[in-house]
Amino acid sequence: MVMKHIKKLYAFLIFFFLYAPIMVLIIFSFNESKSRGSWDGLTLKWYIELFKDRQIMSAMYYTLSVAILSSLIATAIGTAAAIGIDNMKRFKKSMIMNLTYLPVLNPDIVTGIALMLLFIFMRIRLGFLTLLLAHITFNIPYVIISVLPKLKQLNKHIYEAALDLGASPSYALRKVIIPEIMPGIITGFLLAFTLSLDDFVISFFTTGSGVSNLSITIYSMARRGINPKINALSTIMFITVLLLLIIINNRMSKNNTIKE
Amino acid sequence: MKENRVVAPYLIWMTIFIVLPIILVIFFGVTIRTESGLQLSLDNFKRFFEPIYLMVLWRSIRLALISTVICLILGYPMAMILASNGLKMKNTLVLLFIIPMWMNFLLRTYAWMTLLERGGIINTILNFLKLPSLNILYTEQAVILGMVYNFLPFMVLPIYSVLIKIDKSLLEAAEDLGADSITVFRKVTFPLSISGVISGITMVFMPAVTTFVISRLLGGGQFTLIGNLIEQQFLFVGDWSFGSAISIVMMILILVSMGFMSKYEKENEGAGLW
């Protein structure tokens, strides 16, 4: 009985530790006063200022466009790659999978500087294009990792049956395989999208000429000290992430119930 | 099936953006710039073993180790609670654990800056209670706190996912045979969860040892970690050769320890975040 209460208290303290800082940010985003020490009443002025801030708005634009483009392209390349890898001979497959895991396991900072060296070496000016290329690169492995298990579950005979019934390979791919592995594709896409939204380290090294995403903007603002606009931004981002995760989680649990 | 055609774009992409950059890093790492052009040399690596840089390496490893140990001590009981049998709303609680992890990690770090600063919330509360104020922002403790805060879920989730798979009848059997709860934990639960513990340690230690953001924001730039050193070499000093050499050392360290750890991991699922 006592144990039960200790457990509850412990869980509460850990959750408090995790959430208190975020909650403080959210609450203080509505604080009239710029300082944290005092509460001068409710206001939405930091949100208004946030939306008036050119630097943050352009960062928001770049973050979203890079996230959407990179996750779409990574999903296309990654899904195709997963279908191919799934049909490979064992040796070739394990070699390619090892390489695929490399950017996942490698420290972000190494991936970042390696890509930066590549872009400078190839004389591509650091900016939107390099940022996009970098994001596609680190997203593809996550798509492959999400799609491969679905392909393993797939009954190979369905594809053969489609071919026997006169479907061309590409028709069978579109009408049989793709719909079957769709949940994996969507999970991969969402994962890629979230990772791209959140990335700092790799973006930090691969962007330039005035193009920066939200993480980089937050970093440069935070280095200069406290700024209430960041609180407002945190609140918006927290709610966005929360909604995205609830959607992903619902998908996952739906898939699980179907499996059972 | 025509595997080659569908994999081709990926293979090309991988060659250009994964293999080639790493070859470039290795190339810069083993060359030095002299008057007669680039020259093959291991000087960059030798330089890394000078005391001043070894200190940086040691500090990174020490801070990451301390944070990993704290995460393990705080995280293991939490994983046990999440995995315990009669828990209502188990999925919701696990999801609650995942949410902060997906919040932009700069914002999470920034949140602690605002909490710890001189006129921040923690000090306001302490002053109100007439307690001495706490000035740990821009110290090592703040860096460790930031690491623990950011990486705690990476410790809890792998351990949790191993714990829920443990066959409960094993625990009952141990109890039937007269073991008290401490013995059950020591002899049954903990040994069975070791693969989760190992992947937890990996997932906390690796990002902690390579971070340069937490040390910059919460350490105020006074605590150069190996990540900061790499950043400086590339962005401020412009010594790509030395920066590449440090990156190679770090990459080898991480990949070797990953390989070492994965030997102990019986199943890959241990690392699953979901």
Image (cartoon, rainbow, N blue to C red):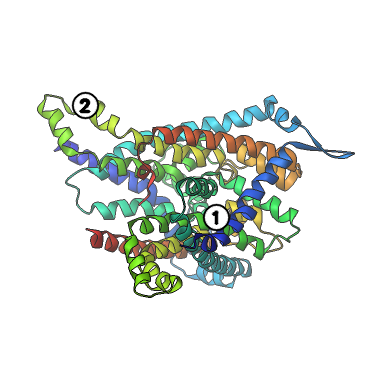
The residue located at (45%, 60%) in the rendering is A83
Which corner quadrant of the image does residue A211 belong to? bottom right
Q: Chain of mark 1?
A: A
Q: Is residue A172 above or below residue B203?
A: below
- Quick one: which residue is furthest to the left in this view? B176
Q: Amino acid at mark 1?
A: Phe
* Apparent side of residue A247 relative to residue B223 in the rendered image (left or right): left
In space, the residues marked 1 and 2 are separated at their CA atoms by 44 Å
Residue bearing mark 2: B182
Q: Position of residue B256 (x, y in %)?
A: 53, 33
Looking at this view, name the residue that lies furthest to the right.
B36
Q: Check disc 2 and report its element: helix, strand or loop.
A: helix
Q: Could you tell me which chain the residue with mark 2 belongs to?
A: B
Residue A92 vs residue A147, the one in the foreground: A92
Mark 1 lies on residue? A138
Residue A254 placement, left or right of A124: left
Pinpoint residue A39: horizontal percent, then vertical percent.
45, 59
Q: Looking at the rendering, in which quadrant would you find the N terminus of chain A?
A: top left
Depth order, front residue of A102/B202: A102
Q: Is residue B202 above or below residue A73?
A: above
Quadrant containing the C terminus of chain A in the rendered view = bottom left
Across and down, in percent, residue A248 comes to 36, 62
Mark 2 surroundings within 10 Å by alpha-carbon count, few (fewer than 14), some (14 through 19), many (20 or more)? few
